[in-house]
Amino acid sequence: MTSAEREAGRGNDTALSIGAVLATLRTDFPDVTISKIRFLESEGLIAPRRTASGYRQFSASDVSRLRFVLAAQRDQYLPLKVIKEQLDAMDRGLQSPTVTALKPRTSMANADGLPTAADFATGGEIRMTREELLAEAGITAAVLAELEQHGLIRPGAAGFYDADAVLVARTARALTEFGLEPRHLRSFRAAADREVGLLAQIATPVARQRDPDARERADEVLRELAALTVRLHALLVKTGLRNATPR
């Protein structure tokens, strides 16, 4: 749909408030917030109309664009710049929404729900700004500062964040609902660093072998080891929980 067609269709759309849009989207995107919708507007991905008193009015096409953006971020971890380029191409009729239909990322976990080596494969690099991370994870700057202070999130050398930082932030946010603060999660960071160090000791000699495929084999070893260690950890927690509560 071009921008002209979208504007022409607005007159026939039922205007929705930002609260109504939030309620509509949360069925498929439970983590979306009003702040996130406002942020996407500020970045130019949507442009809802305003009433004379300044209230936002969203059309059905606005909601469709929001769904496209949220799905692209959730399922493909696409940065906003790329998503905006896709939307612009669709507005100009250069790209069909059916062509850009998003294929959700599927879990490679086994039937028992535990991870496999494929889950640790490195994807394309995602560079997110601090503001994008806050909007994506639904956390405040103060919470992010705490997560960084205790080593749970570490920005890259250029100050950008990757998709895993969003997942860590969301998980930490969920844990706070049970009374666990970022400072309580330092032990998880320390344990993860110890495991990474141990696995690196095993994979490094493989990477240093003198053949063209050494690096690739080392990466494969790391992925296999990572899946096995996470699997072992999950099983140990599972068995430990059997006696964690009084009978």
Image (cartoon, rainbow, N blue to C red):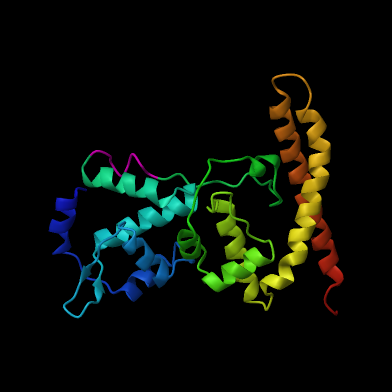
Q: Position of residue 10 (x, y in %)?
A: 17, 62
Determine whether, in the image, residue 1 is placed left or right of residue 218: left
Determine whether, in the image, residue 162 is placed left or right of residue 71: right
Instruction: Indicate yes or no whether the magenta region holds residue 189.
Output: no
Q: Position of residue 222 (x, y in %)?
A: 74, 39
Instruction: Indicate yes or no whether the magenta region holds residue 98.
Output: yes
Residue at (79% x, 58% y) in the render:
191
Quarter-of-image position of residue 35: bottom left
The residue closer to the viewer here, 162 or 94, is 162
Determine whether, in the image, residue 241 is placed left or right of residue 35: right
Asked whether residue 226 is in view, the answer is: yes
Image height check: is 82 above or below 65?
A: above
Residue at (48% x, 47% y) in the render:
76
Q: Position of residue 39 (x, y in %)?
A: 38, 65
Quarter-of-image position of residue 12: bottom left
Residue at (53% x, 43% y) in the render:
125
Is the magenta region chiefly helix, strand or loop?
loop
Numbered range of the magenta stretch:
94-101
Q: Position of residue 91 (x, y in %)?
A: 23, 47
Asked whether residue 234 is in view, the answer is: no
The residue closer to the viewer here, 209 or 24, is 209
Determine whether, in the image, residue 231 is placed left or right of residue 98: right
Image height check: is 30 above or below 105?
A: below
> Quick one: quadrant of the C terminus?
bottom right
